[in-house]
Image (cartoon, helix red, strand yellow):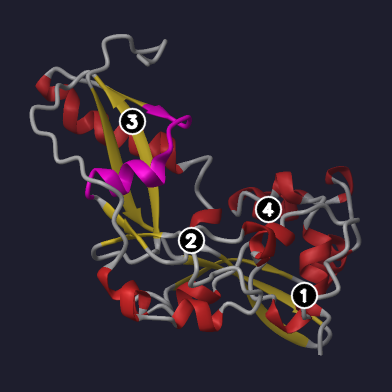
Amino acid sequence: DQPIDMPEAKSIIIVAIPSPQIGVLFHWNGESKTLILPPTYVGYSTLPVKMEILVNEVLNPMGYRAMKTLNLPIKPLAVHSRLAEYGRNNITYVEGMGSFHHLFTFYSDMPCEQDDWREMKMLERCAHCRACIIKCPTGAIGEDRFLLRAERCLSFHNEKLADVPFPAWIDSSWHNSIYGCMLCQRYCPEDKKFKDWVETRAEFSLEETALLLGHSSNDSLSAAIMEKLDRLELIESLDVLPRNLGVLLNRE
């Protein structure tokens, strides 16, 4: 369907940019712990705008324009168009970036003269590798089918509200990120060059950490805390943070 805001659209442009894990330093129980936000969890509110500007800087001199869109199936499009390939863990991999990337789509009025569309493709290495299957503690990645068992994925369970307890079958030692899960990516051979790429972008003192663990509302948090949460794009997640931080910071 032609987009309402760009009825003259003739193509879809897909962009991949490298993206690190984001480290967040917390002080708690006499220790300093750096917790991780996976590559795709930071940047969705700011990067699309920056990428739209960048793409238009390329297209405008040629007489074309692009408009960002959030309503397209971006991972399948990236694989169909040969920009990316699927891993067995249902995550996309881009050459030179591994799975440490952001994907963005844009409508454009630039005509597309060449069609390199292909059927879905999985990484060749995945046919003979079981690393993600072995390292996934919840059994979300199986050998009997390509689709992830989302109901068993740790990411599915740590994105729920603070008053929803974790299922009894989830061991606290499995938790490894503030949101999401990095285990299948950290042990994937395709990510060997990228797995240690972490950029620390915020630090919370003991007092600030206590406030976040204490289910504090926006109104009770200082401007300094709110600025850090905004930078991490976590303001909308204040009702989830206490649950996930608690299990990461308070376990033995």
* Residue placed under numbered mark 4 in the picture: 229
Q: Nearer the viewer, residue 161 or 30?
A: 161
In whole angstroms, how far apart are the C-alphas of marks 1 and 2?
A: 23 Å
Q: Which residues are magenta?
A: 68-82
Residue occupying image coordinates x 88% and y 57%: 164
**Residue 30 screen position, x and y as percent:** 81, 88
Residue 96 drawn at (x, y percent)? 24, 65
1 or 2: tag closer to the N-terminus: 2
- 4 or 2: tag closer to the N-terminus: 2
Task: Provide the residue designation for mark 2.
Answer: 39
Quarter of the figure with residue 180 = bottom right
Closer to the chain start, of discs 3 and 4, is 3
* 144 relative to 56 in the view: left or right: right
Label 1: which residue?
Answer: 170
Q: Which residue is mark 3?
A: 106
Between the C-alphas of marks 4 and 1, the distance is 27 Å
Badge 1 crowding class, 10 Å Cα cut-off, few under 14, some 14 to 19, many 20 or more, is some
Q: What SS does tag 4 mark?
A: helix
The amino acid on which the numbered mark 2 sits, given as a three-letter code, is Pro
